[in-house]
Image: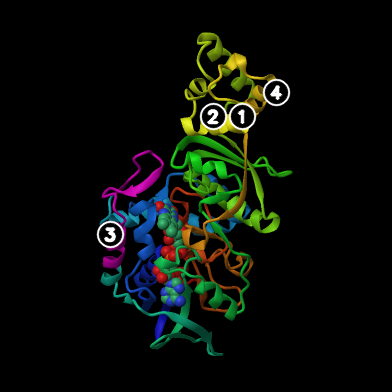
Amino acid sequence: MYDVVVVGSGAAGMMSAITAAKAQKRVLLLEKMPKIGMKLKATGGGKCNITNMLELDDFINSFGKQGRFMRDALSNFYHDDLLKFLSDIGLQTHAPDGFRVFPTTHNSKSVLDVLVAHMKKLDVDFKCNQNVQKINTDNAQIYNIYTQTDTYKSQNIIIATGGLGYSSLGSSGDGYKFAKSLGHSVSDLFAAMIPLQTEEVWVKNCRADTIAKATLKINLPKMQKIYKCGDLIFTKNGIRGPVVLDFAREVTPLLKKYKKVPLLVNFTKGMNEESSLSFLKEEAKNSSQNSILEILKKILPKSLCVELCNLSNIDFNLPYSKIDGAKKEKLIKLLAWTPLNIIGHDGFDKAMITRGGVSLKEIDPKTMQSKIVKGLYFCGEVVDLDGPCGGYNLQWSFSSGYLAGCLKN
Ligand SMILES: Cc1cc2nc3c(=O)[nH]c(=O)nc-3n(C[C@H](O)[C@H](O)[C@H](O)COP(=O)(O)OP(=O)(O)OC[C@H]3O[C@@H](n4cnc5c(N)ncnc54)[C@H](O)[C@@H]3O)c2cc1C
């Protein structure tokens, strides 16, 4: 009989196990993969962007209207607490850009190593290759946890099974199944932080070109206020890169509703129609013999210049003065906003985050305990919260894991 069984050895599960063990609880951590913390090890391209230095209110707002649920967990254990905790157990961290925090080793393994060493020190009993298949509870509020080989008993259970993305790293939605079987509801689930596929096939000609500071917005009524700016990379069938990963969580729920989501993209670092026109006129005046391609190459990669000329029906070898007025107008419009229609994404296996999860209405934000069943706790990505790129999601996993591990009733 354990005081608590934690299912899942991600950031949330390990943090909750450590917190409970520190309070002298008898803790068992079950992980279905052969190795512990496989997703944590893959984070930040192997460097692990642990958290960021944002003020609490701004951090909460970054998670959208659901974010206010996080206030208690974050107030109890925010970035200062996390970084002090990591330092106390032997991990040095830094923020090279003053915002995103990484281990000084720039190696996610060192984060995993200190957490595992600390669990060992605290006598957390952890077992890999234990795929939890069913959880039930009897009237005496004892949980039975069934894996493929064993049955465990515990007074409390913490579900820290992550989302649906990157199933090769372990999380494949089991937590939603457990939550439902114990009476909880789960909201619609969408792939987030994922490359997007476009209807426009011309993107493949710009494949691998990176556009710095591209701005994306959704071209649907009442949605144009949602926009993001950052680096964008073209792929053989769409777009990827930091700005796309961040924006995808706004787009994928709309894809389900509309099947096609129209975006407007500014590739010209915020130039509008007026400044695009001035730029072209100025360039044409200074070097009248230069082709439009030569001019556009000053602000965009060649492949994209060619495609924008094609879309405007312009022969890119012509000088600006020789281009027909209507075509010039079209080009200027495209320089301000190029339409791209999103028709799909690369699938959950490429999604770094899941949007949706166990309903927040049924979890007490002060404890992370179920409002439906006593002794059942949730933490990390399995709940209905998702943040942008930049250390937001790991901080949430650590903070909610800490609060769940306190086992407050
Ligand atoms: C490639 C990649 C890079 C990322 N980089 C960053 C980053 O740099 N910074 C950031 O903030 N976020 C990043 N994220 C997001 C972040 O990794 C997740 O939000 C976070 O890891 C979620 O933690 P978690 O503990 O809730 O779940 P997970 O880390 O997914 O852990 C869940 C664990 O539960 C186990 N499990 C699932 N079902 C069962 C079962 N039935 N029985 C037993 N065990 C089970 C899984 O095997 C897994 O080990 C990245 C995500 C990916 C995929």
Relative to 48, say whether 287 is above or below: above
Range covered by the magenta-colored residues: 93-118
Q: Nearer the viewer, mark 2 or mark 4?
A: 4
For the residue marked with disc 4, what is the amino acid?
Answer: Ala
Q: Considering the image in quadrants, where does the N terminus appear? A: bottom left
Mark 4: few, some, or many residues within 10 Å (few <14, many ≥20)? few
Q: In screen coordinates, is 225 left or right of 7?
A: right
Q: CA distance from mark 4 to mark 1?
A: 16 Å
| In front of the other: 97 or 174 | 174
Q: Which residue is mark 4?
A: 326
- Whether the residues at callouts 1 and 3 have beta carbons within 8 Å, the answer is no
Q: Tag 3, which secondary structure?
A: loop
- Residue 249 vs 188, above or below: the answer is above
> Is 44 placed above or below 175 here?
above
**Residue depicted at 50% across the width and 74% down the height:** 174
Q: Label for residue 268?
A: 2
Label 3, label 2: how far apart the Cα atoms are: 46 Å
Residue indicated by mark 1: 336
Q: Nearer the viewer, residue 219 or 6?
A: 219
Q: Nearer the viewer, mark 4 or mark 3?
A: 4
